[in-house]
Amino acid sequence: MNPDFEIKDGELIKYLGKGGDIIIPDGVTSIGNRAFFLCKHMLSVSIPDSVTSIGDFAFHDCFNLLSVNIPDSVTSIGEGAFFSCSSLLSVNIPDSVTSIGEGAFFSCSSLLSVNIPDSVTSIGSSAFSFCSSLISVTIDGATINLPETENVETGNILSMIIKKHYSIKINNDIKYNVIFQMYALGLDKEGVSAYISENFSDMFPVLINMNHTEILQKILDSEKFVTKKNIDEFIQYTIDQQKHQSQIALTDYKQQKGWYQEIDKKLKL
């Protein structure tokens, strides 16, 4: 039994560990109320696909939490589940979720974008209130771009991620994911493109692994980063990792650019 977790009848009652990148054990079926309350050293949490519900105030005041992986087994996100997770940069709400509780993401002031699937039939009041950096909300496939205001702290977020103005180490997968999201949202400020260009060979495989096909397509559409020199390497990577959608997108892009024809011409010569 893992001493970091107090588990009873499948419910995670209380987290007792030291934080960092937390992986909840397989077999847990629910995350109890206040299970991670004020876990100030938590950076990321991976939830297994055995979990079906996230309890009320489960991650309340986990103010260093940057990323959470919610599997498509979860059907409900409780009241105040991520209340005041002020460092939370991204969250993916899967198609399995039907209800989001009152104040679920209240005061997640670093949250940039939210995707709410059409499976959600109930959203409690103030679920996303005081999310002052939120600029894009996708509901049932339709994206609403919110106007930038003086409250949007994208410059501060970018400084924390890229310029390393922080006292805790950020997992590279989380960092790369967030930077790609910022680029996809049009936040090409403070050297986002330059950072991606400089680190693209390390960053792009992370994007492929996370199956972010929409962001991947935006990267291709930009025509800035995927080149004749590196595309074959990335296509081979998608084959090795069995990422078929990404493989199709990359091979289609190579065909559109005419790079297959150039190879054929060289072979004929």
Image (spheres, rainbow, N blue to C red):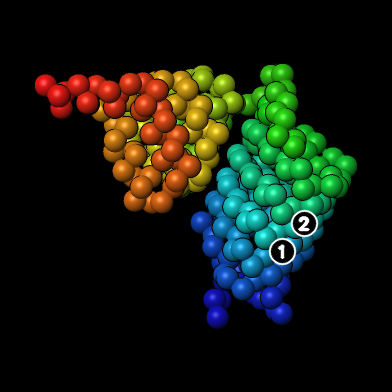
Residue 88 is left or right of residue 231, and the answer is right
In the depicted structure, whether residue 221 falls above or below residue 172: above
The residue depicted at 50 percent of the width and 46 percent of the height is: 210
The residue wearing badge 2 is 76
Q: Residues within 10 Å of mark 2 (few under 14, many from 20)?
A: some
x, y (%) of residue 30?
71, 67
Which sits in the foreground, 40 or 218?
Answer: 218
The residue depicted at 42 percent of the width and 30 percent of the height is: 252
Point out which mark residue 52 bears. Answer: 1
Residue 254 is left or right of residue 102, and the answer is left
x, y (%) of residue 47?
60, 60
x, y (%) of residue 17?
56, 67
x, y (%) of residue 236?
31, 43
Q: Residues within 10 Å of mark 1 (few under 14, many from 20)?
A: many
The residue depicted at 70 percent of the width and 23 percent of the height is: 145
Query: In whole angstroms, how far apart are the C-alphas of marks 1 and 2?
Result: 7 Å
Q: Amino acid at mark 1?
A: Thr
Which sits in the foreground, 32 or 237?
Answer: 237
